[in-house]
Image (spheres, grey):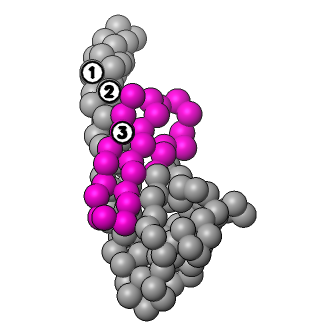
Amino acid sequence: MKNKQAGFSLVEVLIVLVIIGILAAIVFPYLRRARMAAENANAFATMKTIINAEYAFYSQNQRFARLSELNTSQVPLGTIDSSGRLTRGVFTFSMVPLNPTDQDLRNGFTITASRSDADIIPYTITGDHTGQITQVTP
């Protein structure tokens, strides 16, 4: 009586691994692009939120706010570092100039958002007191 063992041969397992590797090589770039697009959309949405919060702050204080002043309001936007930059996800938001005076903030504001991960092509979004959001890519 012969004993036949059931199971997969080494060749069959290797073929499956090669197929999985090929599929991963095809799918990975698309997933990375989708992730980057979602992060960029999040940065646009955050910029819109900041601009709307700036308008609300201006209506109460007759000047626009610093990012640190906005972040302490009822809607936390992200993490503020000691220099006044706001980090949310892979983007760092900063005011131009970095530490504006109250007089500067009576006249308007400009905020830039830049990707903070070094392995990706630099990507910058700019928003200002007119409500305009501009995307700057290299």
Q: Residue at x 51, y 84 (%)?
A: 73
Q: Residue at x 31, y 48 (%)?
A: 134
Q: Secondary structure at mark 2?
A: helix
Amino acid type shown at disc 1: Ile
Residue 125 visible in this rendered orientation of the protein:
yes
Q: Per the image, is 17 magenta?
A: no
Position of residue 22 in the picture relative to residue 59 (left or right): left
**Magenta region, residue range:** 113-138
* Above-or-below relation of 132 to 60: above
The residue furthest top is 11
* Above-or-below relation of 94 to 120: below
Count of numbered marks? 3
- For the residues labelled 2 and 3, the Cα–Cα distance comes to 23 Å
For mark 1, what is the residue?
Answer: 26
Residue 113, percent from left and from top:
46, 51
Give the number of the mark in front: 3 or 1: 3
- Are discs 1 and 2 less than 8 Å apart at CB? yes
Q: Which mark is residue 29?
A: 2
Give the number of the mark in front: 2 or 3: 3
- For the residues labelled 1 and 2, the Cα–Cα distance comes to 7 Å
Amino acid type shown at disc 3: Val
Residue 75, percent from left and from top:
45, 80
Residue 61, percent from left and from top:
48, 88
Question: How packed is label 3: few (under 14 Cα within 10 Å), some, or many (20 or more)?
Answer: few
For mark 3, what is the residue?
Answer: 136
Give the number of the mark in front: 1 or 2: 2
Q: Per the image, is 133 magenta?
A: yes
Amino acid type shown at disc 2: Pro
Nearest to N terminus: mark 3 or mark 1: 1
Q: Which mark is residue 123?
A: none
Question: How packed is label 2: few (under 14 Cα within 10 Å), some, or many (20 or more)?
Answer: few
- Are discs 2 and 3 less than 8 Å apart at CB? no
